[in-house]
Structure formats: structure tokens, C-alpha cells
Image: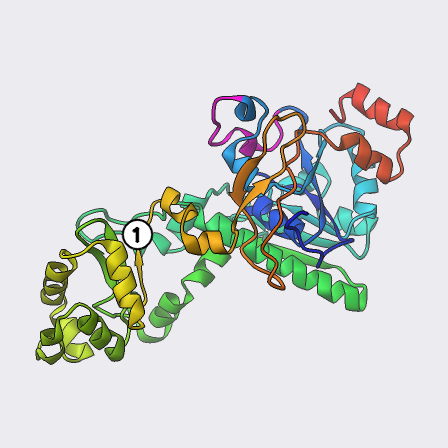
Amino acid sequence: MTAMMNFLKGVRVIDFTQVISGPYATFMLAQQGADVIKLELPKGGDQARSMMRREGPFGDAGLSPMFLAFNSGKRSLALDLKHPEAKAVLAKLVENADVVIQNYKAGAIDRLGFGYDWAKSVNPSIIYCAISGFGQQGPRAGAAAYDPVIQANSGMMTLTGHEGVTGPTKVGFWVCDMATGMTAAFAVSAAIAHKRGTGEGAYIDLSMLDVAASFISPMATNFLNFGAMPYLMGNGSPGGSTASSVYETANGFVQVSAATDGQFQAQCGAMERPDLISDPRFNCRESRIANAELLREELLKTFALADAKTWENRLGAVGVPAGAVQTIPQMVEDPQIEGRNLVKTAQAPTGMASPYRTIGAPMVVNGELDGTLPPVPRLGEHTADILNEVGFSADEIAQFSKSGATN
């Protein structure tokens, strides 16, 4: 049994995307049951096939950790978009599809001849999602962008890091790519629901910069209305709770989020520090803000008496949100992660001797925890099957391959 759901069963998605933002969006759609046809260049395919590459059979097969993470359950069709015969192939694909998703720079796919206007002329009810760094309009619409550039332009990096130590610091993973992918999956799913009710398609213009800005909208709203300037917060709380931070313990670090007076008092009780509750320097929010460094020094003295997991348990027992800072190996073996079967085994890709493990879709539906993931595709693995499904004859399929249009 596979772990995929069937909410989008019968929906066909033509996926022009590569690397992270688009593939994560179509991964989420595939996990909901959509038939995702991944278009890849015959030579090399998705750039992600070689990113984070590991030596060995998987690396040699173009199955990098990056590709394994975001492409389960898709089918691969290798097609040279610049080949004269590509338009005939794509017309058939789009004619028989519900959704097109692409993450080219603004204008690039139009220059190839496969923009929204073309897709709509082929299929008037198509849902077309264009993901790009800066959107399809504006002075930087056609500029290249990777995740760190968006973190910088959005203001996100001015919130992350330590004043006088690190300066502006990017988040340690592709947060803007991932957020954009999730937003795209949501927008496309909403458009599918609309289409089921009305028969109408949609054109979705999705900017990574817009998504990143929306993720820090409380800070932007604070500035727009009250002139408050954001600053590098390190491990501090955006909401101004001085007791909320990361603390070094006897073994490891623990994140504590005591946001209210009640939580701070419960924290002090669990730490056997009732003196901090009555101390006039710390007995109200305003006093704690005025004496933040003194409070931190007092808390660190006590946190040093036990390890991070002990503090996680003690504080959690009295209703204070707290969590040990875990490594990736610790996270994947966490009983909470294991209890929800988030780490899934995926079926072995074609031609590979062994399956692999990855993170599945981050939701549990109807209590269903079991199941494996379908495999990721080898480059061009499903080309002939897909072309046959949309009406090309065996002779035509052979000609496409011979001419170099397909693999």
C-alpha cells in the first residue's frame, strides 16, 4: 500500500519545474493523488538530479538526495523544448491536462512559445501556475533569483542573526523555495476546486519575493503602521518575550517559549527558582524587558544543572513550550516523528536494487499512518507510455526519439 492520498485523483499536472520551489509544489500535488508528468531535458534532466550528489549507485543514476526528496510519485518525460517537434508533443500534453506549472524566469517560457496564452489557446480551461523569483510584472520581473537572494531582498535576513556578531544571516535551508512551493500547491488546489464547480481555468502568478514578504508580514505591518524598525533577534522572541530563547544546558541546548506571565511563572516553578517570580526586576513583562540580560544570566545558571531533554520534559509537564535542539539524526529517530510515520520508505526506483527513505507529506488524513511512497522516476522513464496515452502512435513516438525531440 502506498502512502499517497486520492483527493486529486484524475487531475493531470504538466510540470515544467526543476530544483526546489516547483518540484516541492508538484510533490505535494502528487502526494494528493495527482498524475504529475515531469518534463525534463533529455541531457541531464532536472538540475536537482546532480545537487547534493552522493557517490554510488544512486548518484550515478542521477538520483541525488535533493531529487529523491521532492519527486516521489511523478512520471518523467524527457523532451527538448527547443526542438521543432516539441510544440506538437506539448500541445497534446496540455490538451489532456488540468494544470501546468512552470518556474522559469519571467518571460523565458514565453520566448520558448509555451506561456499562458499558448496553453490557454490549446486548452481554454487550463490552470496555469507561473512561479518566479519576482513575479511576471515589475522592474525585476525577469531577474534570476535563488532562495538566498529572496531571503535578502524580503528583509528576512535582517531578522536572523546576532547584532555585532554575525550580521544579517540566512536561514540554513531553502525556506523561501519551500514556502513558495507550499503556496503554489495551495493556490493550484484552490483553482482545481474552482474549476470543478465552474469549468473555468486560472492563471496564477506566484512570486517568491511576495511569499517571503507575506511570511514576515507582522514585522512589515508593525513598521507600516507604527514605524517600528525590525532588528537582528538572534534566538530572541519576535513577540518580545525575554524569557523565550535558546539556552545552553549541561548537555545540549533547549529552546524555551515562555510567552505569558503565567508561562514564565510556571517555568520558574519547574526550574525551582521561585525567587525569580518575586524579584522586582523580573515580576512583570516590562521589568523582564528592562532587565533581559540579568534574567538570562540567572536562567543559564539553572539550565546548566540538567540536560536539554530533562528541561524539555520538566517544562513541558507544566505547560511551558520547550524543545531540545536536535540534530537531523535525532529528529528522524524522535518518538514523535516515528509515531506519526513521517519518515517513509519509498519503493526502489527502476533499475535500483534498494529502496530509500525520505520525509513524506506532512499531514495525516483519516488517521492513516502506514504505507510506502512510490518511487522517483528515472530520467525519461515514462516518455513512451505518456506519449501513447495522449494519442501518439508507436511510429510517431519512435520518430520523436530518433529526431532527438525526446530521449
According to the image, label 1 marks what residue? Answer: 325
Does residue 316 appear to the left or right of 15 in the view shown? left
Figure check: 298 above or below 269 = above
Name the residue rendered at 60%, 33% in the picture: 46
Q: Amino acid at mark 1?
A: Val
**Can see residue 318?**
yes
The image shows residue 261, relative to residue 375, as above or below, that is below
Closest to the observer, 155 or 337:
337
- Of residues 349 and 89, the one drawn nearer to the viewer in this rendering: 349
12 lies above or below 87: below
Residue 256 appears left or right of 186: left
Asked if residue 175 is positioned above or below residue 393 in the image, the reply reads below
Q: Position of residue 341 (x, y in %)?
A: 52, 52
Task: Give yes or no for residue 189 being in the magenta stretch.
Answer: no
Identify the coloring: rainbow
Query: Magenta span: helix, strand or loop, mainly?
Result: loop
Q: Is residue 232 visible?
A: no
Q: Residue at x 68, y 26 (%)?
A: 42
Residue visible at 70% across and 52% down?
A: 33
Residue positioned 84% across, 41% down in the render: 92
Q: Position of residue 325 (x, y in %)?
A: 30, 52
Q: Over which residues does the magenta segment extend?
A: 44-56
- Residue placed most toward the observer, 101 or 318: 318
